[in-house]
Amino acid sequence: GAVVSQHPSRVICKSGTSVKIECRSLDFQATTMFWYRQFPKQSLMLMATSNEGSKATYEQGVEKDKFLINHASLTLSTLTVTSAHPEDSSFYICSARTGGDNEQFFGPGTRLTVL
Amino acid sequence: QKEVEQNSGPLSVPEGAIASLNCTYSDQGSQSFFWYRQYSGKSPELIMFIYSNGDKEDGRFTAQLNKASQYVSLLIRDSQPSDSATYLCAVGLSGGSYIPTFGRGTSLIVHP
């Protein structure tokens, strides 16, 4: 149990295009989902927290108009990187949690390369 | 500001030895503690969680929590080369919509 999927696993796009990444909890309902970004050999950086049915809460320094997050249901959250640029190239990882004290379960990650 | 500190390493141990990974945290209200393992190029996977003072064992892994001293550790017995990875400590408050804080991770290398 507690499986989180992400799609796509890898994406290469041209500068200026938008990319949507999906995060799904496959066998549980996720009241909260988190989006992280990780650059090579660096630690996880929390970008935003999303709760089903409400607006995402973004961490300081993360542009909400650039990184659009939608948590439309208890099993799906999406992150859209709008007008992507090479500096947005990174490993994007989502995680999901049922709530309270429960642990987070991570998706396999999406590696974004912007040319 | 909540902080979770880990020695970045690398921690190098021989195969078969015990690897000891440590994590300290600043928020005295912290109630839940997690250890994740992350292989290079992969996402983190949960190894263990602990809520109460003392030890919690799961196979070759033992988590140890000392709330008075504000540290949590992970012991890996009979270390294997496949244990070579970065280990992330995460700390959170109890209940509600807390956001867990992750440490930067400790790189472990188990050499044959």
Image (tube, coloured by chain):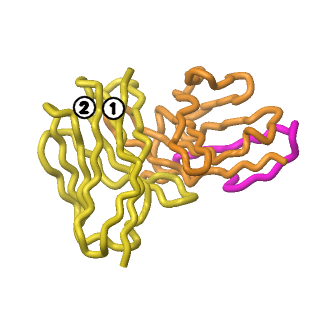
User: In percent of the image, x 72 and y 44: which residue is there?
Assistant: A89
In this rendering, would A65 be left or right of B3?
right
Name which residue type carries label 2. Answer: Gln
The residue located at (30%, 75%) in the rendering is: B15
The residue at which mark 1 appears reads as: B92
- Left or right of residue B93, residue A84 in this image: right
Label 1 residue SS: strand
Q: Is residue A112 left or right of residue B78?
A: right
* Residue B31 marker: 2
Q: Please tell me the colour of chain B.
A: yellow
The answer to whether residue B44 is magenta is: no
Chain ID, orange in image = A
Q: Position of residue B33 (x, y in %)?
A: 29, 40
Marker count (numbered): 2
Report the residue at 26% width, 53% height from top: B74
Q: Is residue A2 above or below residue A101?
A: below
Locate residue B30: give its quadrant. top left
Residue range (magenta) = A8-25
In which quadrant of the rendered image does the N terminus of chain A lie? bottom left
**Is A67 located above or below residue B14 in the figure?**
above
Q: Are marks 2 and 1 in contact (CB under 8 Å)?
A: yes
Most common SS among magenta residues: strand
Nearest to the observer: residue A23 or residue B50: B50
Q: Residue at x 36, y 69 (%)?
A: B110
Amino acid type, callout 1:
Gly
Q: Does residue B63 appear to the left or right of A43 in the view shown?
A: left
Residue B69's image quarter? top left
